[in-house]
Image (cartoon, grey):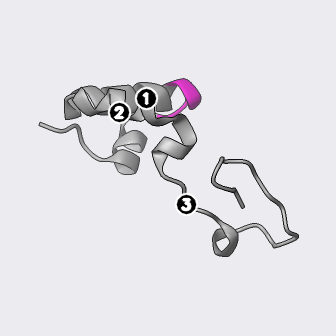
Amino acid sequence: MANENGEWIMRGEEYGMPVSVLLPPEAVWGYEAVTAAYSEKPTESWKRITDRIKELYPDSDDADIMRMIGKEPE
């Protein structure tokens, strides 16, 4: 579980969705990083996301990525 500062707090619960905590993107990456993306066009964001997935998972192909995040916006 994470507190408002994004620091993990372990309380002995089993791992899984019942003990997960949802944090807004601003809490994870910071306000400046999140708001900097507000001016991006959807196609630019989609390209950045797909490039990052390919960087993290080089064996993934375009079909895998499409199933995960959807088709490129028009």
Say which amino acid is labelled 2.
Thr
Q: Is residue 59 above or below residue 68?
A: above
Contact flag, marks 3 and 2 (Cβ < 8 Å): no
Quadrant housing residue 33: top left
Instruction: Locate residue 22, reporting x and y percent.
Output: 55, 60
Q: CA distance from mark 3 to mark 1?
A: 20 Å
Say which amino acid is labelled 1.
Glu
Q: Quadrant of the N terminus?
A: bottom right
Q: What residue sits 69% from the left and 71% below the top? A: 19
Which residue in the rendered view is the most extreme toward the left? 74
Query: Is any atom of residue 31 visible in this view?
Result: yes
Contact flag, marks 1 and 2 (Cβ < 8 Å): yes
Q: Is residue 59 above or below residue 69?
A: above
- Tag 1 or tag 3, which sits nearer the N-term? 3
Q: What residue sits 23% from the left and 28% below the top? A: 39
Q: Nearer the viewer, residue 73 or 67?
A: 73
Residue bearing mark 1: 32
**Residue 40 in the figure: left or right of residue 51:** left
